[in-house]
Image (cartoon, rainbow, N blue to C red):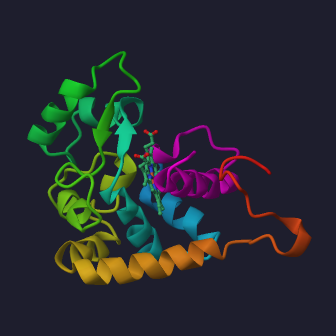
């Protein structure tokens, strides 16, 4: 059975992909403007985008999703962090090798994800872009200092996400197994 984190992840990627079906790029390579506008199509603000991305305080990502970031010597990545991540993610092969999205406390729901971003230690390009000298920097900085504000904004945005186009009456069903139609 799919874990809660898998369900959340699949939901958000479907949200992104369903509004970007012509796009050839993986969502991890989207720029900030695309992330903001994609979330906006579902009624989410930039603040919601940042709060929801904080779900990456838990879980892991496969090498294929962040290889480009750790090998292409970008200026928005901490050099030590990139070098550590390269040990688990070779320049070729090992596509499914896993690394924690939050290197400090990968199993705790806290605000270290945001503290990492401030230190240029975001694993995915789509994480680091939230703190890259642009409009969302101040929100990331706020959450990095105020964990309870992050948690309350996250909870509110999750409830909002659950309200996206819900199926009602006989249009849908409550699944017995979450990734299978009954
Ligand atoms: C902002 C756009 C987002 C992008 C581009 C994105 C992308 C990704 C990617 C590439 C992974 C790694 C998947 C893998 O390696 O198999 C991942 C993992 C994850 N994502 Fe996101 N994500 C986004 C937003 C979200 C949101 C809004 C949530 C939840 C509210 C979320 C929750 C998770 C979780 C919990 C994992 C870890 C899954 C696990 O370890 O099993 N993500 N995400």
The dominant secondary structure in magenta is helix
Query: Where residue 17 sits in the image (x, y, percent)?
Result: 64, 50
Residue 10 among magenta residues: yes
Residue drawn 78% across and 49% down? 181
Could you tell me if residue 45 is visible in this image? Answer: no
At a point 31% along the width and 77% down the height, the residue shown is 150
Image quarter where the N terminus lies is top right
Most foreground residue, 180 or 145 = 180
Please provide the residue range marked out in magenta. 1-29
Question: Where is 25 relative to 64, above or below?
Answer: below
Outermost residue on the front side: it is: 176
Q: Can residue 10 be seen in this view?
A: yes
Residue at the (37%, 16%) spot, across then down? 93
In which quadrant of the rendered view does residue 47 lie?
bottom left
The image shows residue 135 at horizontal and vertical percentages of 35, 72
The x and y percentages for residue 110 are: 25, 67
Whether residue 150 sits left or right of residue 44 in the image: it is left
Q: What is the x, y in percent for residue 158?
A: 51, 73
**Front-most of 112 and 45?**
112
> Is residue 97 placed above or below 138 in the rendered structure?
above
Kindly identify the residue that appears in the image at 23 percent across and 77 percent down: 147
């Amino acid at each position: 059975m799919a874990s809660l984190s898998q369900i959340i992840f699949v939901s958000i990627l479907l949200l992104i992909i369903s509004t970007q079906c012509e796009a050839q790029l993986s969502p991890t390579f989207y720029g900030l403007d695309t992330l903001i506008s994609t979330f906006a199509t579902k009624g989410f603000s930039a603040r919601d985008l940042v709060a929801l991305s904080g779900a990456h305080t838990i879980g892991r990502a496969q090498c294929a999703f962040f290889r480009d970031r750790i090998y292409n010597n970008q200026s928005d990545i901490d050099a030590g962090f990139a070098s550590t991540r390269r040990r688990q993610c070779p320049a070729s092969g090992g596509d499914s090798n896993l690394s924690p999205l939050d290197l400090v406390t990968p199993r705790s729901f806290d605000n270290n994800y945001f503290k990492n971003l401030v230190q240029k230690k975001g694993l995915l390009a789509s994480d680091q872009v939230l703190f890259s000298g642009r409009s969302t920097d101040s929100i990331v900085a706020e959450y990095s200092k105020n964990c309870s504000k992050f948690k309350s904004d996250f909870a509110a945005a999750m409830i909002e996400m659950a309200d996206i186009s819900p199926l009602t009456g006989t249009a849908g069903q409550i699944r017995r197994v979450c990734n299978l139609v009954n």
